[in-house]
Amino acid sequence: MHTYKIAVISGDGIGTEVVPAAIEVLDKVARLDGGFQFQWTYFPWGCDYYLEHGEMMPEDGLETLKQFDQIFLGAVGMPELVPDHISLWGLLIKIRRGLKQSINVRPAKLLAGLESPLKNPENFDITVVRENSEGEYSDSGGRMHSGADEIAIQNAVFTRKSTERAMRYAFEIAKNSRNHVTSATKSNGLTYSMPFWDEVFNEVKEDYPEIDTAVNHIDALAAFFVMKPQAFDVIVASNLFGDILTDLGGAIMGSIGIAPAANLNIEREYPSMFEPVHGSAPDIAGKGIANPIGQIWTGKMMLDFLGHHEAGTRVLDAIEKTLASGIKTGDIGGSSTLAEVKEAIKQNL
Ligand code: ATP
Ligand code: MG
């Protein structure tokens, strides 16, 4: 029996409610599978820790995390007491960058029993692979002059290594999906970065003759996301384009409380971090009404990354069965509590 050592950072707000629920589901699916188990180690890092110690996590926190197989994170943020840039840079971005989690993966899929705001959602099932370490979100640029002559410059940095890594990963997962990759570009407007992006995409696709490809400019792609999301399988996008697309993806799924995400170190040199798209949602924290599905589906992504696809499928099936039976939290039009949704999902495993 294999034991996975998982570092758990529940964080703040509803993170402390949805993480324990997801852990119960993951423990149960591991028991049912019989081939592996989890050993959870809890770290009380986040905004409460900051208010007490003046930092979101200890100095040697990254070194500590490196001893684990993966990291399971809830949400951090307490906007009334801790400025967002501190909670973001002091923990999330520190871990993503420090542990070289250079790929972000977010599915957008219409689950049974959920209502999409789209008129004709049919069955869409999209995976967005986002470059997570550079691109438009680089630290390069500056400000100059003042008054009417003021100029702000923000450079975008695209390295061959990171661009190619994101693209290869997209093709690899397309092999286990529906064999299609769409590249999100804008080479008709951006004159250096995106022509380079296109070039690398064309090179990489030569290595995957069995995979069909499409290239869409990001503006058109965003429109297609709304008009015909079923046209997509895997999409590979830069840091900024991927950020925007995945929020849109969360929206067409029906609620941000559903959407899962993974920050991957695909080389498996360091642990990857699995965290839902939503934040700490202070407005509903402590009431027992948060939707645990985003966190539970995030757990399914961790199972997949660990190679336990059967257990992962079991979790997603149980989520869909639960939703289809009408057991839903308020954000998706139901009146069930977090605990009721969690129990139903465990039953449906
Ligand atoms: P962050 O800056 O950490 O991304 P945010 O302010 O953008 O956080 P979230 O915390 O993700 O936003 O939530 C926005 C709103 O969506 C919340 O105020 C809450 O009402 C709702 N929401 C988010 N997550 C959930 C959830 N799991 N269940 C129910 N509602 C949720
Ligand atoms: Mg947000």
Image (tube, rainbow, N blue to C red):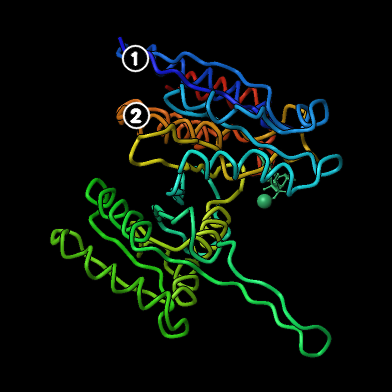
Q: Which label number is shown at residue 315?
A: none
Q: For the view shown, which residue lies furthest in the front direction? A: 145
The secondary structure type at the circle numbered 2 is loop
Q: Residue at x 55, y 37 (%)?
A: 275
Q: Is residue 30 left or right of residue 40?
A: left
Q: Which label number is shown at residue 36?
A: 1
Q: Inspect the image, locate mark 1, and give the three-letter code of the amino acid beneath it.
A: Phe
The residue indicated by pointer 2 is: 306
- Asked whether the residues under the numbered discs 1 and 2 touch, taking CB atoms below 8 Å apart as contact, a structural biologist would say yes
Q: Inspect the image, locate mark 2, and give the three-letter code of the amino acid beneath it.
A: Leu
Q: Is residue 96 left or right of residue 1?
A: right
Q: Residue at x 54, y 25 (%)?
A: 22
User: Gap between marks 1 and 2, in whole Å?
Assistant: 10 Å
The secondary structure type at the circle numbered 1 is strand
Q: Residues within 10 Å of mark 1 (few under 14, many from 20)?
A: some
Q: Quadrant of the C terminus?
A: top left
Q: Position of residue 164 (x, y in %)?
A: 31, 59
Q: Based on the displayed image, in which of its 4 quarters is residue 46 positioned?
A: top right
Q: Position of residue 18 (x, y in %)?
A: 63, 28
Is 252 in front, or is 68?
Answer: 68
Q: Position of residue 172 (x, y in %)?
A: 25, 49
Residue 299 sits above or below residue 203 on the image: above
Q: Residue at x 52, y 40 (%)?
A: 98
